[in-house]
Image (cartoon, coloured by chain):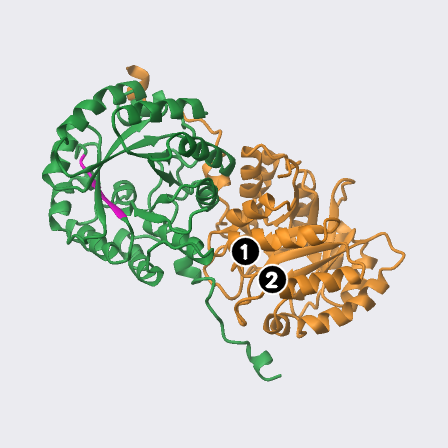
Chain colours: A green, B orange
Amino acid sequence: MHQRVYIQEVAPRDGLQIEERFVPTADKIALIDALSGTGVAKIEATSFTSPKAIPNLADAGEVMAGITRHDNVDYVALVPNERGVERALAAGADELNLVMSASDSHGLANLRMTPWQSLARFPAMIEQARGREVFINASISTAFGCPFDGEVSAERVIDIVERLTALGIRGVSLCDTTGMANPAQVGSLCEQVLTRWPELSITLHVHNTRGMGLANVLAAWQAGVTRFDAALGGLGGCPFAPGASGNVCTEDMVHMFEAMGVDTGVDLDALLAVSATLPELVGHDVPGQVVKAGRSSRRYPLPEHVRQS
Amino acid sequence: MHQRVYIQEVAPRDGLQIEERFVPTADKIALIDALSGTGVAKIEATSFTSPKAIPNLADAGEVMAGITRHDNVDYVALVPNERGVERALAAGADELNLVMSASDSHGLANLRMTPWQSLARFPAMIEQARGREVFINASISTAFGCPFDGEVSAERVIDIVERLTALGIRGVSLCDTTGMANPAQVGSLCEQVLTRWPELSITLHVHNTRGMGLANVLAAWQAGVTRFDAALGGLGGCPFAPGASGNVCTEDMVHMFEAMGVDTGVDLDALLAVSATLPELVGHDVPGQVVKAGRSSRRYPLPEHVRQS
């Protein structure tokens, strides 16, 4: 098990896209700039998608132009199609995150494409980026289950990873888009993928919809995964699980790893300070727990009756 | 790793004791009766403690007298002292749960006894139960950390387990009373205890204060633990972590195990139905997530635009 993991912050994209209110561009930039100073390895800053599909991220270009970049942080843009690639390249993204679904119905619902249609479009998108200094990652949504189709087999996901690597893609995210994964499944799939493609950069992206977020992170880490997406405060969510929790919470995940003696590269106090600004930014309480309870190492004063005895 | 685990419900005791309102005796009895039909192995029904210390459980005797017992469920009573043992025996508890702390300050704060003073009192309490058909378990609070003293070493906990087994005790609960444990620590301590005392019945009791509840359960299960305390709805809490979550949530834990293919003996639908009654019972929302999001296997209808295409 690896003693260094890499934290990839997705709140500005996966978190803010589902909020009820549009977070002003200047506030998004301030959030990303604050996150840049915490030691996270990557920040998924925005999505270059249709403003009609995701109005909350209609300011993608302005956000990318407004942030102050740190040398040791990669700024990622999610791109659903060729137009997205064009805009993300123009904005100078360090990484393009191509997105597809593992399941037919989720692909059709979310992208209006089956997995095979998505895969057929990726070569043109990759071609657009040729010669540019940009890393290409592909995210496989519903890799652990689909809210419409139900079970998604490991064989299907491995088939997709095979096709992605054949396109020259060197980074793949296994995404539990609607929080359906369990630790046995996560451990098994991650182990199979890592065994077959030891050189591939694998990211686990999980939601905490059914409370298994950190358990799934633990299982993936035990299987050898070292890159984890998470959203500050546990922002995010899923339109198919109203009332449920969002992405696994960045600071709770960092806290767990640090408590276990695993280096995250992140300054947890700095991260907690940024998280504490979220309720005002989004206008509601957020699910993150460490920001409320304090670290495990927090000490309390002795009760009066003990001090007197 | 074991494919059968035993679920020990503690909401009636560890959950209700910290609620702001006194739950009427009849409602407590109804809750325990409903839980008895779900397949949980044990129910910690109440605590025979001073009504001044825990007014919410002042009706311990009436609760024990009022419940309808199921043959395959053990009804547990927490007992802090000789008076508690006497009352619990009179009430016909199937199991006495003796409680002590691993740390000096928590013991003094909670029980007005150091661990060593607790251990000195246990022989008299065990003697009281001699000849009675009652199982004796000992709970070690703050086994993974103390909110006053900080770290609690594994050596200290193992020393305590050694002393408990020397008293003839055959069941020990390792309790993360204030949610300080992390999975590496849980896995390591459980493995050490199970290796040294393979015949001992070990229970893991964790709180979800910092979001690590199910990750800690997973780590303990991987180490060979098969008995888990949990509270319906994630009730419970800790006076030292205001605003934080309570015990690990029974139905979320059962859901995780079942999704992993581990038999819990519990009818999850029945358990979820009981959990759905909690907000009205306690007067507030509760942390459990599966009751809100539904099981992982939940299916959603296809969106209109997909059905039409």
Q: Residues within 10 Å of mark 1 (few under 14, many from 20)?
A: many
Q: Is residue B247 left or right of residue B100?
A: left
Give how far across and how far down residue B56 sits, in percent: 63, 61
Q: Is residue B99 visible?
A: no
The residue tagged with tag 1: helix, strand or loop? helix
Q: Is residue A44 magenta?
A: yes
The majority secondary structure of the magenta stretch comes to strand
Residue type, label 2: Ala
B130, B276: nearer the viewer: B130
Placement of the C terminus of chain B among the 4 image quadrants: top left
Residue B308 on image: x %, y %: 29, 15
For disc 2, the marked residue is B154
Q: Is residue A205 visible?
A: yes
Subunit under mark 2:
B
Label disc, if present, on residue B101 of the rendered structure: none
Q: Is residue A65 above or below residue A110?
A: below
**Residue type highlighted by circle 1:** Gln
Q: Residue at x 47, y 45 (%)?
A: A218
Residue assigned mark 1: B185
Name the subunit of mark 1.
B
Residue A80, image x, y percentages: 22, 30
In the picture, residue B83 is in which quadrant? bottom right
Q: Is residue A12 above or below residue A179?
A: below
- Residue B162, how many percent across, how many down? 73, 62
Query: Badge 2: how crowded within 10 Å, few (<14), some, or many (20+)?
Result: many
| Dots 2, 1 in contact, CB < 8 A | yes
| Residue B197 shown left or right of residue B141 in the figure | right
Q: Nearer the viewer, residue B104 or A291?
A: B104
Mark 2 and mark 1 lie on one chain; the one further toward the N terminus is: 2
Q: Specify start and end residues of the magenta stretch as a single range.
A: A42-48
Q: Nearer the viewer, residue A264 or B14?
A: A264
Of A211 and A239, nearer the camera is A211
